[in-house]
Amino acid sequence: MKTHIHWFRNDLRLADNPALSEAARAGAKVVCVYILSPEAPWAMGGASKAWLHASLSALAKELSDRGVKLFCGIGDPVRLLQKISEKVKASAVYWNRSYEPYGIELGNKVKTTLRDKGIECHSFSGNLLLEPWQLKNGSGEPYRVFTPYWKAAKKIYVELEPPLRRPSLESYAGELPGFGAVEALKLLTGHPWEKKMLQYWEPGENGAKKRLTKLTESFLKAYPTQRDLPELEGTSCLSPHLHFGEISPKQILSAIGLKGAAESFIRQVAWREFGHSLLYYFPETTSEPLNPQFKNFSWKADSKALEKWKKGMTGYPIVDAGMRELWETGWMHNRVRMIAASFLVKDLLVHWREGAAWFWETLVDADLANNTLGWQWVAGCGADAAPFFRIFNPMLQGKKFDPDGNYVRTWLPELSKLPNKAIHEPWTLSAEELRACGVELGKTYPKPMLDHGMARDRALEHYQALKS
DNA sequence: TGAAATGTTGGGGCG
DNA sequence: ACGCCCCAACATTTC
């Protein structure tokens, strides 16, 4: 009987896992491994590590219910996969592809190294609806604008094969020296924050399925109109599950279809696809602007301002509420991400890379493709980017998308007694009025760290300087 | 998946 | 009845 290795990467699920299904075909024994490579660039942030720990634990349990072990190890995946292959006398290694620069490089190295030793390597499309190279524009170039990408993608989405069922697995009975249980990866620091943050989530395939069920059963219908209101549970919260591959985009598409409200949701899934395609073709955009004009932009190195932003102490309630939600839950509502990001990049003129780095550290759904696309989009230097002069006004955005201030009150309890009309601009009240609400600006909540009107004019000047 | 400035229109109050 | 002004509501343009 043959022995195969399934190399788990960001595909931490059993259902609709093409590489795993193929590895298990014809009753082959499957050795399931997960390898953490510490020297990888864009090493995981704290939130991601905590999530990964919980997700791998869930996966290990699912596997062990089927009599299968999950072997976890730390080190160079190329070397370790070779070692394991020799030890278990595997004839082939299977995995689902990554589209990040380092992930691609790793896949290629594993392929060349193992094939030299006579071990087959098979990589699969498991984490995207479409491979980046499947979709090019009329002139054979990758799309740089979302709408035409979406139009072309939609036509192909309707023809996709249905997702795969969970395969039945034959266990490998032996041991693997140097490999252990999930704990061996030392992903947790033991800080109480990790436990607190994870209370908001259920990482793993089952948790992902619950989120999908909630989407289909309760809020898909209202999604197009309510997804922009951060006080509601109007969004799917599937992003971390998707990032770690606890659910595949194909499973989502197959569950909700592409008609009516579902189309507006799948459109968001397509943004993820678009981001991965961009990262595949423009890998340098993780640190360099896609639009080369922005290489000369004069960002401000202002560590004090950056610190206030990170802590949610800017004095602009909608921004601060978002940053506090992020710190508390490892997640932030998409609308608020745009507002907070615009504030950092345009009001504070801090480099988008700083914001991207903070999101990378703190988001449970931190994803190189999405993070890069999002920040470059906000900064105006990326694909389909918001023009630089599109500057969010935190007060107007607050009034528009959090009209009753419920979102702000949730994350900034120190402002909870403010009346609706002042919740997004506390400084418009007199000191006495504020005192009546238990607020003293500069003490219980910061004064605005700078005037938005001034910041807006300043940002526009910087943009003008760039053009000339 | 902006916001502000500027332009246009049309209803109503009023002399 | 008419012109004038005000201004809200909406549209367009500009940044």
Image (cartoon, coloured by chain):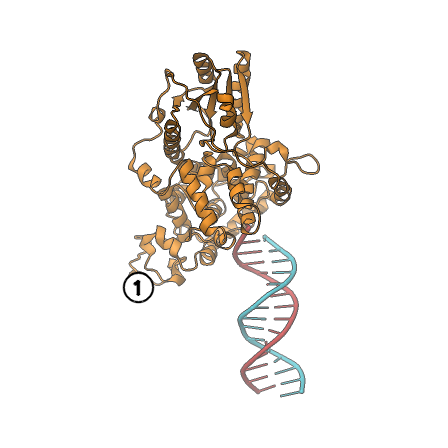
Chain colours: A orange, B red, C cyan
Image side of residue A118 versus residue A424, left or right = right
Q: Indicate the chain on which mark 1 is placed.
A: A
Circle 1 — which element? helix
From the top left corner, tell me how far across and down residue A116 is, in percent. 55, 12
Residue A102 visible in the current orientation: no
In the image, A221: left or right of A292? left
Q: Quadrant of the C terminus of chain A?
A: top right
Residue A405 location (% of width, % of height): 39, 57
Q: Residue furthest right?
A: A139
Residue occupying the point 50% across, 25% down: A95
Front-lying residue, A306 or A18:
A18
- The mark tally for this picture is 1
Front in this rendered view, residue A346 or B11:
B11
> What's the residue type where badge 1 is placed?
Glu
* Residue indicated by mark 1: A432
Crowd around label 1: few <14 · some 14–19 · many ≥20 (10 Å): few
Give x and y (percent) for residue A266: 54, 45
Q: Quadrant of residue A380?
A: top right
A227 relative to A358, above or below: below
A348 lies above or below A69: below
